[in-house]
Image (cartoon, rainbow, N blue to C red):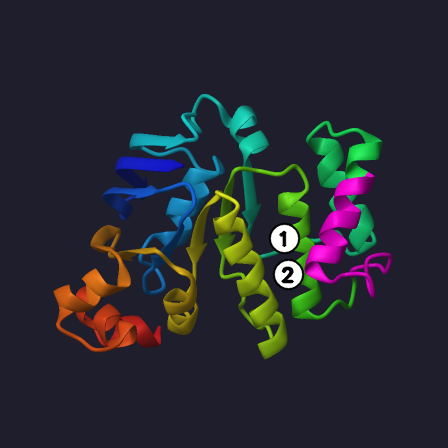
Amino acid sequence: MIKVSNLYKSFGKVEAVKGISFEVRDGEITGLLGPNGAGKTTTLRMLYSLLPPDSGEIRIDGLDPTTDAMEIKRTLGVVPDSRGLYTRMSARENIAYYGQLHSMSREDIKSRIEELVETLDMSDFIDRRTEGFSQGQRVKVAIARAMIHRPQTVMLDEPSNGLDVMSTRALRRYVLDLKNAGHSVILSTHIMQEVAALCDRIVIIADGQIAADGTAEELLAKSGCDSLEDAFVRLIGSEEGLLA
């Protein structure tokens, strides 16, 4: 579970995040939405302890990223938008390396990789070097790497960006499986179909602040719109926000 209270972050004179508060609950998928430059990525980076907040409070499974960064990494799985695979290593080696960083035994790493290979359908490329992988293959490796240590809380930053239809469907099934297994999942995405299909709650950030927070039905009612796309545009107060 994630709890964020009155979080602020500035870069010089630029206020990127201005006092946001929200929760990501166990057994739920929470969508983090907003136009480019709204503060989503800055927020995520503070959550997984890459950036320190200027003020405010973050708790991830009861831990504070500013003081418990190493312990949080044991309970957290992160799929960043950059993916960041080591291209000279095979998919298996990329995943195993992260297992070693989490102090897993060789036997546990081996069995866990076999489990993830089956779950994510990676048998055709698990022992190939990741250089030249398709976007879908890269995303699967990034997910397996993030999940190698069985984290309770999972953060996915634009996971379906560039995926084909079949890879997107497989990704959605996997994310729903995480939810059903009791994980707390935060999903940052621009794709409204993904939000509608997956998210139990939606947090919309605009100009570094929370523009809206609730279920899809609550946001539709609040905006007076019939679609999430229209609701998003109305709640951030800008047609440009959806097109950026």
| Residue 226 % position (x, y) | 21, 78
Residue span colored magenta: 110-130
Mark 2 in CB contact with mark 1 (< 8 angstroms) = yes
Give me the C-alpha separation between circle 2 and circle 1: 6 Å
Task: Identify the residue position indicated by label 1 in the image.
Answer: 143
Q: Residue at x 40, y 49 (%)?
A: 28
Membership of 121 in magenta stretch: yes
Q: Please identify the quarter of the rendering in which residue 194 is found.
A: bottom left
Membership of 154 in magenta stretch: no
Circle 1 residues within 10 Å: few <14, some 14–19, many ≥20: many
Residue 214's place in the image compared with 162, above or below, is above
Residue 223's place in the image compared with 188, above or below, is below
Residue 11 can be seen, yes or no:
no
Residue 60 can be seen, yes or no:
yes
| Residue 241 % position (x, y) | 28, 70
Question: Which quarter of the image is occupied by the N terminus?
Answer: top left
The amino acid pointed to by label 2 is: Val
The amino acid pointed to by label 1 is: Ile
Depth check: 10 or 22 in front? Answer: 22
| Callout 1: SS | helix
Q: Please identify the quarter of the rendering in which residue 189 is found.
A: bottom left
Return the residue found at the far top.
67
Return the residue found at the far right.
127
Depth check: 73 or 66 in front? Answer: 73
Q: Residue at x 54, y 67 (%)?
A: 160
